Image (tube, rainbow, N blue to C red):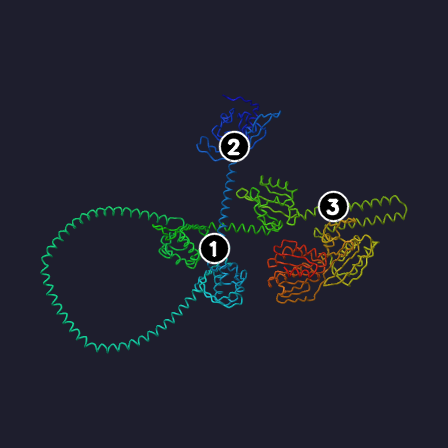
Amino acid sequence: MQPNFTNDLNPEELLIFRNLPQNILLLSPELIIIEASDAYLYTAHKTRTDMSGQHLFDVFPTYTQWLPNVDQGIERSLREVISTGEAHELPVTRFDTPETVGAASLKERYWKTTNKPVKDANGNLKYIIHLTEEVTEQVLRENRLKDALEDEHKSAIKATVLAEQMERLFHDIPAQIAIFRGEDMVFDYVNPQYQRELFPGRDILGLPLLAALPELNNQPIIDVLHQVYSIGEPHIENELYVPLAAYKGGKLIDHYFNSVYQPLRNDRGEIDALLSFKYEITEHVLARKTLELNEQKLSEANEQLKAAYEELQAIHEELQASNEELTSTNEDLQKAQHSLRELNTQLEDRVAERTKQLEESIEEQQGLNEEIRAANEEMLAANEELAATNEELNITQQHLRETLAGLTATQQRLSNLVNDATIGIILVTGKEFKVDVVNKIYGNLIGRTTEELQGKALFSIIPEAEATFRPIIERVRDSGETLYLYDQPYFVYNDHRTIEGFLNLAYQPYHETDGTVTGVMVLCQDVTEQVEARRKLEQSEERFRFMLNAIPQQVWTARPDGALDYVNDVVANDFGFAGHEIVGYGWQQFIHPDDLPGCMHAWRAALTAETPYLTEFRLKMKDGSYIWHLARAVPFRENGVVTLWLGTNTNIDLQKANEHKKDEFLSIASHELKTPLTSIKAFNQLMQRTKDPEKLNGFIGKSADHIFRLEKLISDLLDVTRINAGKMTYELQPFDFTQMLSDSIESVQLKADNHQIILESADSLTYTGDRLRLEQVMNNFLTNAVKYSPNGGRILINSRVQDNGVVVSVEDFGIGIDEEHLDKLFDRYYRVDNTAMRFEGLGLGLFISSEILKRHHGTFWIESRQGQGTTFFFRLPLQNDEPVEIIDQDDVFYKDKTITVTYNEAAKRLDVDWTGFQDLESVKAGGMRMLRMLKHNKVSRVLNDNTHVIGNWSEASDWAAQEWFPMMEAAGLRYFAWIYSPSAFARLAAEKSADVSIGNVTVQFFTDYYDAERWINEV
């Protein structure tokens, strides 16, 4: 019976629906199929006649996925749409369909299904749109990716296990192993046995061979090592003689080794290291030599005994000849008497015997006849048994021939199996591991033919492999248990060449018929290409990680699903956690809570769309502060599939701060520019209204002041623009420096009625520079002094030539500046907010001054105390042709005009005294001298005195923090006592230099030398 339903769609709507490119059904609330798209009909292999007007489950009755009793089934989803009036999406479901119409087999397919209600104007359910999207390729691709990742994970586990096994092998192997790196033969690795047996009293790791073992100089072994390194051929030598000392300067002791020196090559095939593999045989050699000496002594004694014996033998022979002559006559007489007696006895015996024989003759004849009859009967029985036995023997021989034929066939099949196998097979038996079975593949692995191996002791052919593989074979033979080794490296020598690679090995005990283990069967699969490919991949990944760590910003990677899986060292240093800990936590723990929702939404959107990710957020640093970062990530695709995300977090905190300063500056600039313009406009209006000459002159003067102020603001803005564009011009000419100071003082004094500006002292000086720009610096310094002493008073200026430079100071006695602002005053747009005062200006004057001074290779600094006043300093270098006196005493004492470094042998530390004015060049030179002396004297503590430093060295603080401190730590620095300079600016630079992650180095600041010395002596 045809179900009742109403289709009120017009033909045009039906046509549009049918031509939709998706797989769509239009259902009634009763699940009657109203219409189907052409795409759906094609996918389902149905016709419109088959489906139109039919109940959904009448059309698809045989597929269990449609049945209502299946969880998350289609019927359940449709019922939920009908009951709730809300759309419902099914999870991806496997639903196999015929590949073609009428095909018996089904094709594996996956579908994503959505059921969506369509309501009328009153909100009642009118239709259900059933949308099915095939996602087979996506699911299969994801499955393949999961399988690939799982395989990669397994490979990584195998590689890790192998690395651990190899590390344990090198650690536990009863041989002395070392690796020398480079032409200087630097000890790169020594195993415990090497260190323990040869050099228990020396620290040789990381030292060149001759530096670690100077006693080897001019010994033949050095020539051997250089020959191996240069030619690239291994050197094998038994009973190698090398005299060595257990500790440096100790007594030389004779050593004998069975040794192998093997060249090691890098990825480019270049020799960059040597492997030393030795067995200590000193006791054996000395015992043999002692035995040889004893044998020689014994041989000499035997020769002496032999000569004495020969003399004694000659005397004995003479005595014997005399005795023989005396006894000869007696012997002849005795023989005659004896012969006569024997003749008589024989005659008597013959007579008696003959008589007896005649008596027994008849009885013997009768007994003999009986024995013959019995023997005949036994022979007859034996012949019958022999016939039966012959028959059984014939049958047994037939079975034996058949068994031998079967054994021959089995043996041939086994031989074919071994010979045709694609892996190497060898069977070794006996204590010497004689080769009983071997195939060609195994022979190829070690560069031998089967004829060369068959019947020979294996390690007589490849002795270089004995140290590695004999213990393994013995272990399997003795335990009777199978052993598997994967990616096992091996090398053998043949015809002056090295054959090496990697093998998967299976060691199986070989049992005789009585169950005893007499040998070991070894199966060898050559996996050299796979291992080298994996190693290249690992090296590529290692280089990739190294490259990421070399990038001076946060770098990270994520899996295709967005899960974080790697962060570089910058992230770890910034957050104060190990990389794997950060990966475990994820970004959520470090992103500011206010920024988290937005950045997570952007991240999910990027993952879904597989498009680049870009957002800004604040990250929590290890000191608890939050720093703005710009996050970027791009998807990396392989064969069109995203395999990872590569991201960076760039520190934009400075940009954010500058943006804030710029916004604040624009607000201030708008106000500061409007103020004089408003005043000028007001005074112009007053001038137009008044006719009083006295008032008019006053208005003109005040208007002129505001015009000057406006010009100053505009001039500062133009200078900043020129500085930013690199177009600030300088005219360097000789000029009277003292006169320039006087002109600046006079210019500012005219506008500072409440202040007395005094040039206290000024050394006469002709200086080469841009006079106008330096006068601008002085004007800015003087203007600031006036500004920060609003109650008037004196301003003192001094200029002196000191340490190849001219130092100018501008001192006021005003309100002072808090120390937290000192190092920022020369920044662009920076203005000090003081609760007691509000000063005019854009905060550009000191920034412009700093740029002018830098262009003249000068420095600047400030000393200030709140409530007591401020002193601004700047220093300009002068040309000095006098030679610099340097004292350098073999890395135990060094002194020049800026630093003194002393190796304090009693305290095992470096004592450092910095002196005078410092700049980037002098700080770098002094720092590198400290590094050199720290390495040479192998100390871990430094007493660093800055009390004699003058001025500002802040331009070197970044270098000290980012480059110098890490180098000092790598050289062995662990404790650093830093005595502050009296200069606040220098103190700030010191704290900035040490405000870095310097690993194991402890930095402590002091204001008193003796406190610092006490601390450094106690740690």
Instruction: Give the x, y percent position of residue 984.
Output: 72, 56
Question: Which residue corresponds to the image point at 83% horizontal and 49% vertical from the top-left?
Answer: 704
| Foreground of the two, 102 or 703 | 102
Q: Which residue is mark 2?
A: 71
**Residue type (three-letter) at the residue carrying disc 3:** Leu
Secondary element at tag 3: helix
Marks 3 and 2, how far apart at CA? 65 Å
Secondary element at tag 2: loop
**Local crowd size for mark 3, using a 10 Å CA cut-off: few (<14), some (14–19), many (≥20):** some
Please state which of the two labelled residues, at mark 3 or mark 2, is closer to the viewer: 2
Farthest right residue in view: 692
| Foreground of the two, 751 or 167 | 167
Counting residues from the start of the chain, the first of labels 1 and 2 encountered is: 2
Marks 3 and 1, how far apart at CA? 70 Å
Marks 1 and 2, how far apart at CA? 55 Å
The quadrant the C terminus occupies is bottom right
Instruction: Give the x, y percent position of residue 972.
Output: 60, 59
User: Can you see residue 361?
Assistant: yes
Instruction: Give the x, y percent position of residue 411.
Output: 33, 48
**Residue type (three-letter) at the residue carrying disc 2:** Asp
Counting residues from the start of the chain, the first of labels 3 and 2 encountered is: 2
Q: Which residue is mark 1?
A: 169
Q: Which residue is mark 3?
A: 666
**Local crowd size for mark 1, using a 10 Å CA cut-off: few (<14), some (14–19), many (≥20):** few
Q: Is residue 559 above or below residue 107?
A: below
